Image (spheres, helix red, strand yellow):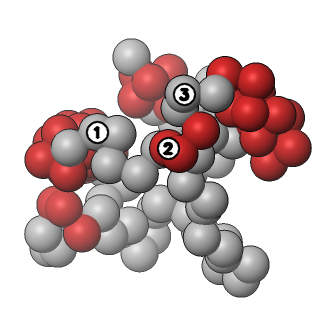
């Protein structure tokens, strides 16, 4: 639900081939700042998680009620800054 245009998107490098080499995984994580494992989780599990997270966003009034939930479309007049107010603690719970 980013309200900022993300201009510098790059594909994540898959670290799956390094799974059998812990030192190479640590070096990759140190160098790149992340570990990405393609298909580590099933698409169905991720879709289920997305639906649950978006339902919480919808309950806080952050989403466009006229759009399909899984689109995750932000309500046009919504403004949320992550912090201790505006429903964020409840969102994370």
Viewer-nearest of discs 3 and 2: 3
What separation in Å lies between label 1 and label 2 (alpha carbons)?
12 Å
Return the residue found at the far front: 20
Q: Residue at x 32, y 49 (%)?
A: 39
Q: Is residue 84 above or below residue 51?
A: above
- Residue of label 2: 16
Choose between 47 and 17: the one closer to the eye.
17
82 left or right, relative to 73:
right
Q: Position of residue 8 (x, y in %)?
A: 74, 78
Q: Is residue 53 visible?
A: no
Residue 14, placed above or below residue 20: below
- The kind of secondary structure element at disc 3 is loop
- Assign the C terminus to one quadrant of the image: top left
Q: Nearer the viewer, mark 1 or mark 3?
A: 3
Q: Nearer the viewer, residue 64 or 72?
A: 72
Write down the residue under mark 3: 20
x and y, in percent, of residue 86 in the image = 52, 36
The percent coordinates of residue 33 (x first, y second) are 78, 41
* Residue position marked by numbered label 1 in the rendering: 41
The residues bearing labels 1 and 3 have C-alpha atoms spaced at a distance of 18 Å
């Amino acid at each position: 639900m980013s309200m900022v245009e993300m201009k510098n998107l790059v594909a994540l490098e898959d670290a799956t081939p390094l799974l059998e080499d812990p030192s190479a995984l640590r070096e990759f994580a140190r160098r790149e700042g992340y570990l990405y494992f393609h298909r580590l989780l099933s698409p169905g599990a991720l879709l289920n998680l997305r639906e649950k997270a978006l339902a919480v966003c919808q309950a806080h009034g952050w989403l466009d009620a006229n759009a399909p939930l899984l689109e995750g479309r932000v309500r046009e007049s919504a403004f949320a800054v992550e912090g201790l107010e505006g429903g964020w603690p409840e969102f994370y719970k």
